[in-house]
Amino acid sequence: MAQQPLEQLSLEDFRKLIPVNGLREENLLQLHKRIDAQRAKAGTRLFEIGSSKSDSIYVLRGDVALCDESGNIVRSIHGGSADALHRLAHQVPRRVNAICRSEVDYIAIDSGLLDVMLTWDQTGSFEVDELQHEDDEDTGDWMTRLLQMKAFQKVPPSNLQAMFMRMEQVQAKAGEVVIRQGEEGDFFYVLIAGRALVTRETPTSPKPIRLAELDASSCFGEEALISDDVRNATVTMLEKGTLMRLAKDDFRALLTAPLTSDISFPAASEKVATGEAIWLDVRLPSEYKNHHLDGALNIPLFMLRLKLASLDKSKTYIVYCDGGRRSAVGSFVLTHKGFEAKRLKGGMPERPAEA
């Protein structure tokens, strides 16, 4: 029997994949150019239980059986089905064996790259909401104003002391670009004197979009440091000013760790069961619909800052996604806004075996 020719996945079909369909068009096009369809013979194992291989695999044609340690089939995926629009048992380490029951065509996408792109695309348009501003006309002490922010009240005193010692003062001229969209994140900034403008460039606008004006006591630049991604907006000084900045490694060690607390699944489940906590799924609605934790509230990361008013500050939010990057940003945002939030360690558990 002649072997069926290997066909590349069309852009139209690529757009249907979940959560690839959550990417901006420009990033989706770039990612599509990087992937090639692959073929595996019947009997091939695409991955095994315990494997740390983290590629996101999508089945295009053929049948793949997901089996437990005893060889029992817990689920079957057929190329072209609705289930095949989702990544194949993507939790790492792998919890099942993925065995080709027939000749299979598939694509593999670097999961780290996909997660970074999703985090970037779902937070980039809203960086202005992450820029904190505290009006305080009674004091010119920037340290005092910084300590009055709810987020910093959760940071251990020793960390705060180290942070103040390591922060560097820089002078900026009117018109000077402090951070530029698309560049690597290097510092966290506090504007202690002067005003600055936040803008963002988009493919659909010939000119940068004006997002906000920042006054003294505004903080910015943290999101790129948390998500380990490039800057998603540009901040330009409107007038001569003074800034304090904290280097990326110091920011992560002194601030990100205290403000991004992990919790295990058993401990989180107990808190949810007692009503003390609520599951918060920050993935796309399509990902949530395919599989989610019972009772979870779904607020995609790109909508989180707009929905803060609807959340209950008396509850603890257990934030989860698949890879942990989006949930890290989500839990930091909530903590920064005065909520009790924890990130689910290890990401969302795999879908239970089907009866």
Image (tube, rainbow, N blue to C red):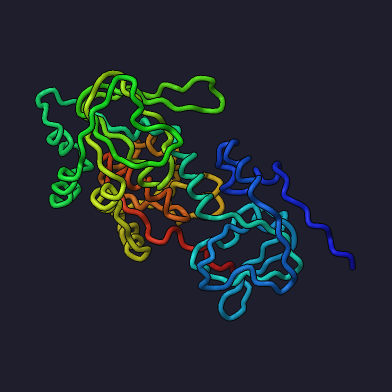
Q: Residue at x 60, y 69 (%)?
A: 47
Q: Looking at this rendering, what residue extends furthest in the right direction?
A: 1
- Give coordinates of residue 257: x percent, y percent: 28, 53
Q: Residue at x 59, y 72 (%)?
A: 97
Res 303 visible: no
**315 with respect to 349 (left or right):** left
Q: Quadrant of the C terminus?
A: bottom right
Q: Residue 5 is drawn in which quadrant?
A: bottom right
- Give coordinates of residue 120: x percent, y percent: 47, 41
Depth check, front residue: 101 or 159: 159
* 126 vs 18: above or below: above
Depth check, front residue: 315 or 113: 113
**186 with respect to 95 (left or right):** left
- Give coordinates of residue 73: x percent, y percent: 63, 73
* 68 vs 211: above or below: below
Q: Quadrant of the N terminus?
A: bottom right
- Give coordinates of residue 340: x percent, y percent: 27, 48
Depth check, front residue: 217 or 74: 217
Q: Residue at x 63, y 49 (%)?
A: 34
Q: Residue 344 is drawn in which quadrant?
A: bottom left
Q: Residue at x 42, y 51 (%)?
A: 325
Q: Residue 166 is drawn in which quadrant?
A: top left
Total numbered labels placed on residues in the image:
0
Res 266 visible: yes
**62 with respect to 120 (left or right):** right
